[in-house]
Image (cartoon, coloured by chain):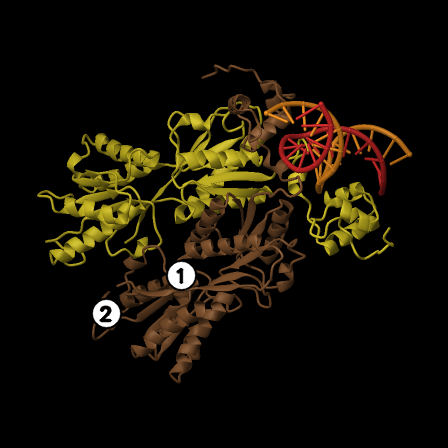
Chain colours: A brown, B yellow, C red, D orange
Amino acid sequence: MDSPSPVAPKPRRPDAVLTVKDVAAVAKVSPMTVSRVLSGGLNVRPALREHVEKVIDELGYHRNENARSLRPGQRSGLIGVTITNIGNPYYAGMLRGIEEVASAHNRRILVGNTNENAELEKQLVSDFLGRKVEGLIIVPAGRDARDFSASRLGNVPFVLASRIVPGLDVDAVLVDDIHGAFDATARMLSEGHTRIAFLGNRVSVSTGQRRYEGFRLAHERVGLAPIEELVRLGQQDVTSAEQALTELLDLEAPPTAVFSANNQNTLGAIRAIVKSRRRRSEPSIGTADAPMIRLFGFDSFEFADMSPVPLSVVDHDARELGRIAAEMLFDQFNSEGEAVTSRLVELPVRLLDMY
Amino acid sequence: MDSPSPVAPKPRRPDAVLTVKDVAAVAKVSPMTVSRVLSGGLNVRPALREHVEKVIDELGYHRNENARSLRPGQRSGLIGVTITNIGNPYYAGMLRGIEEVASAHNRRILVGNTNENAELEKQLVSDFLGRKVEGLIIVPAGRDARDFSASRLGNVPFVLASRIVPGLDVDAVLVDDIHGAFDATARMLSEGHTRIAFLGNRVSVSTGQRRYEGFRLAHERVGLAPIEELVRLGQQDVTSAEQALTELLDLEAPPTAVFSANNQNTLGAIRAIVKSRRRRSEPSIGTADAPMIRLFGFDSFEFADMSPVPLSVVDHDARELGRIAAEMLFDQFNSEGEAVTSRLVELPVRLLDMY
DNA sequence: CTGTTAGCGCCTTCAG
DNA sequence: CTGAAGGCGCTAACAG
């Protein structure tokens, strides 16, 4: 291929990585001069600086950031992010927002998937701390506040994203779950629905709890209460959600409306509705004889507007949530040692009709 | 100076991060013993080991991995991943696959978003190299093979994922675009369709080019050629795809079938078809008078099986693609200096009928 | 089994 | 403007 190599670098070992010394040797200057050039070359004679820069480029040298961060006062430039499921499009959006802000602050992100496993989360955090991350953004899988104590976290600034941990008073950004669920439910109630099903995930997850709370409060406001036999919790995937709603639709007195508290449950609900109508040979669109069930889901998803079932969603921007979480973290960097009142941001939602 | 206080650790500066020395001082052993305990404590008296472990835990000490990786022969435990758009669910799936394998090998991942920007990509890679990543997995935004030369990449092992760079002979994992498009097209041809539209994105992206090639080859095999007026390239979003197909459907001799080369185009196609039938007051299902147009799309999506238009897809698993890319990278680690024949893995696809 | 020494790559400090 | 010395946290190699 191409090898008009003008200068033959002679690293000590053939496979060894280049160091400032190697560059210095080739450029015939001291390592210190190379170091200065790398840091902007403010106090270096312009001609020399250019010469050194050329050598750096020719050799393909990259400064060792790890060694650099070893010196006291130096920052590692790393932010640790742990997510319960990176494959989830929702968290992908969030990650994108985090990356965006981190990049703008010239930081890189270390990403770990906790798979909803608190033990794994602890290990990842510990590893990240070992890599001297400057801060952490965590979608908590664990529910034990002690695991997130300042000492366990090496006094590193951190922010909880999307979920909170009970009893843990720290910076966090959440979706406004309660208002979102409240508004959606209130709307269905105002449309005349009184038998509204609730499909949610484990209440032990803070979002699940908060969304159910909004659902309950909306009923309370009009002097009603959720109908227990129509409340199904704990569906973590599309299949179990589909099954749950199928069962409800087969009841003597089925629900006339459904609130699904997250994507998986919304998708399952749509499938259950479509299949149920097919099974009963009902038309795919609502009619006087066979009115379409009212469906409201928390969180939008890709192609929600292509849903075969009319659908409204409580929407928000995961990417924005990620951005805010990251901004909060960088805020903490700038207010070292100041008042430590923790902030809770609740990202506003909007109701969207996808039909 | 200070009286022996057995419990209270005395770090040099109040906010300084703990080091092995601090632990050693509190545990009343040498730093070396602490180091040994941290590395598994093989040659340490069990009682002493437990004592040290306890101190480590109480103090909340975390070993500095950056300092550790400074020693020669030590690995950084980092893999760099650059992706053109982390927010894209497709790449989120891929990232998950990568993380899964990296984790299994006890490596962490540094993730960067290149936003389809070759310059940004170069900067990210350079930064990652500075952090001494052991390897790189890249979804290339750039198309200049020189940017990926071994010297530019610091001789770090790397793998291209999802796309290739022309003229760059390195390990890569791709979807089997050509066969996928070929098989899909062949099937439509065997069903009797001869006027098949093609909706694709920029041919400059390797996947776009390869998918068109499969489309062309399938025609060639039966002695036909793609009909140029039915080929529309360059639609990057749902709206432009919808518009492109709408135009085709309004031709004197419209296509009887459509091959859409990616998600965005498939969704646009579905919309165009649904609206076109509505506009002409044709029933939403195919009839003898108004037969449904045949639609085949590359890549599946969340609601494919609920499409209002009968649809087949060329499906594959992005997570599996990520896994394979990571496996290939770790293979390279294990075959340092061996034969450097680069491997191209083409992930098999499967045709699915979603009706 | 435990401790001492030295040096990884870089940059702050201080001399020249 | 340039260079030399020293030390960041850690652990191989070598004592003891």
The answer to whether A113 appears left or right of B266 in the picture is right
Quadrant placement of the C terminus of chain A: bottom left
Q: Residues within 10 Å of mark 2 (few under 14, many from 20)?
A: some
Question: Could you tell me residue B260's position as x and y percent?
Answer: 26, 43
Asked which secondary structure carries label 1, the reply is helix
Quadrant of res B337: top right
Given the current orientation, which residue lies at the most extreme left position?
A: B252
Disc marking residue A286: 2
Disc marking residue A37: none
Q: Are marks 2 and 1 in contact (CB under 8 Å)?
A: no
Which amino acid lies under the numbered mark 2 shown in the image of this protein?
Gly
Image point 27% across, 54% down: which residue?
B355
Q: Is residue B319 above or below residue B3?
A: above
Question: Could you tell me residue A120's position as x and y percent?
Answer: 60, 53
Quadrant placement of the N terminus of chain A: top left
Between A91 and A43, the residue placed more toward the observer is: A43
Image point 60% across, 54% down: which residue?
A336
* Chain hosting mark 2: A
Question: Could you tell me residue A279's position as x and y percent?
Answer: 29, 66
Which amino acid lies under the numbered mark 1 shown in the image of this protein?
Asn
Q: Residues within 10 Å of mark 1 (few under 14, many from 20)?
A: many
Image point 38% across, 30% down: which residue?
B143
Q: Do marks 2 and 1 share a subunit?
A: yes
Question: Could you tell me residue B158's position as x and y percent?
Answer: 50, 32
- Is residue A161 visible to the viewer in this orientation of the structure? yes
User: Mark 2 and mark 1: span between their CA atoms?
Assistant: 23 Å
Tell me which numbered mark, 2 or 1, is placed earlier along the sequence: 1
Residue wearing tag 1: A263
